Image (cartoon, grey):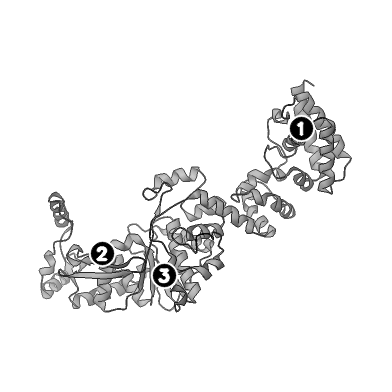
Amino acid sequence: MTEKLPPVRVRFAPSPTGRTHLGSGRTALYNYLLARQTGGQFLLRIEDTDQKRYVPEAEQELMESLRWLGLEWDEGPDVGGPYGPYRQSERKEIYLEYAKQLIEKDKAYYCFCSPERLARLREQQMQAKQATMYDGLCRQLTPEDALRRVKQGEPHVIRFKTPREGSITVRDYLRGDITVENRTIDDYILVKSDGWALYHLAAMVDDHLMRITHVLRSSEWLSTFPLHGHIIRAFGWQEPVFVHLSVFLKPSGKGKMSKRESAQLLQDGYSIFIKDLEQLGYLPEAVVNWIALMGWSYDDKTEFFTMQDLIEKFSLDHLNPSPAAINFTKFDHFNGLHIRHLSVEELAKRVKPFFLRAGLQPEDTKLLQIAPIIRERLVTLDDAVEMAGFFFRDQMDYEADLLVGKNMNPSESLQVLQESYDLLKNLAFEEKETLETALRNLAEQKGLKAGQLFGILRIAVTGQSVSPPLIESMLILGKEKVLERIQDALKRLQPIVGL
């Protein structure tokens, strides 16, 4: 069982070729949880050997996204460690050395086939409805002939020499044994003609040299998992425990997310990119809770988890290999739960940047007063601006006809607003009960429902038809500001009445 695992060494090894998305975040999270639970190490390794697709700013976004989620690594390119360097682009010579070892063991070979020949071969195989694989032409070369051509500077790659006979069985922790006929496995390229190693070699070498005990990675690697088994066994190395995690599907459950759909999501206030989620007002605690449960469960009823909860309860045995559809409604639910879990002080601190971004200047003391009355209503931190921005605005922006109460005419509304002003002018703004009782009594005297009067006052005081509790809002704003806004409302109503 996972609970009895000795300290593990795990790695998150992304390619900085684009933005950091939820799938990467979850892979990193599961690795982190296993390391922390067992008292082991969590490594960050940058797999940047694909120089054509490398995006310089992607690495920085990746690190910022992981740290925002609370996933600190023990070893990595920026913090160092005993098994560095931790960028594959700085390990080029290491991979070449191990590729040559495979050649010496007759487990790999130099291939001199031109791209044109390979393209023709592929076309012929497709026309014949055959599997598109390398035909092994250069397998036939003698080692001496191949080495002579290499020394002459002839362009070449290094391919793995996959056995032609028999089968290989590799073990995935979630799926058990996977057996594949060797004849169906291609002679994959390990080192390209420019000298850069491909993932198949580089990752296996690094996992061995960095003492990785468990490899938690996407199930997209299942198709080349048998090849990786062959490479590890060709060196005679101890195999790590492989755990291929479920893939994320679009919310409909059909297929993976595309860039076009990601753009549409952002218009709806969602994103699959972790950096965007921070800007949209989601809590890292909620993201962690949400993605942890997309592929893992503790039981059939517990849904709220802090990071510490997850470290204690996470188990490889409870991972689900089935694809998981992204459910943003559930995400909103988790974000609300975690917002309500924050202390008043912490919530005030976290909403402040969103007010500042909206051009408002929130006072810290007032934010501490506001936080308790908006906490239950927030879905995202960004909602705080729409809900409570009126506390920090000098000018109210609303249509005057909103001041006409429900089932009332403008004249009646003006009169009751004036009487509210006169009443509040003579009251001390100290006790919620005093203000509320006085206003309810006024409504009753005028033959109105409390909701009619409060609706008019809500527009006058907040400029919104939906707001935090009215009386609490009035107390926070203070008597002077409330009376000033009611006066402004009276001026707006007068033209409608004809005054």
- Which mark is nearer the camera, 2 or 1? 1
Image point 79% across, 26% down: which residue?
Answer: 412
For this view, does 146 lie left or right of residue 82?
Answer: left
Image point 39% across, 75% down: which residue?
Answer: 213
x and y percent of residue 432 in the render? 81, 47
Quadrant of the snapshot with the C terminus:
top right
Q: What element carries label 1?
A: helix
Task: Name the quadrant containing residue 318.
Answer: bottom left
Residue ID for mark 3: 11
Residue ID for mark 1: 489
Whether residue 197 is visible here, answered yes or no, is: no
Kind of residue indicated by mark 2: Asp
Distance Cα–Cα, label 2 vs label 1: 74 Å
x and y percent of residue 119 in the render? 17, 54
Distance Cα–Cα, label 1 vs label 3: 61 Å
For marks 2 and 1 on the same chain, the one whose residue lies earlier in the sequence: 2
Outermost residue toward the front in this view? 300
Q: Is mark 2 on a helix, strand or loop?
A: loop
Vertical placement of 430 versus 229: above or below? above
x and y percent of residue 193 in the render? 23, 64
Q: Is mark 3 on a helix, strand or loop?
A: strand
Task: Name the quadrant containing residue 130.
Answer: bottom left
- Tag of residue 428: none
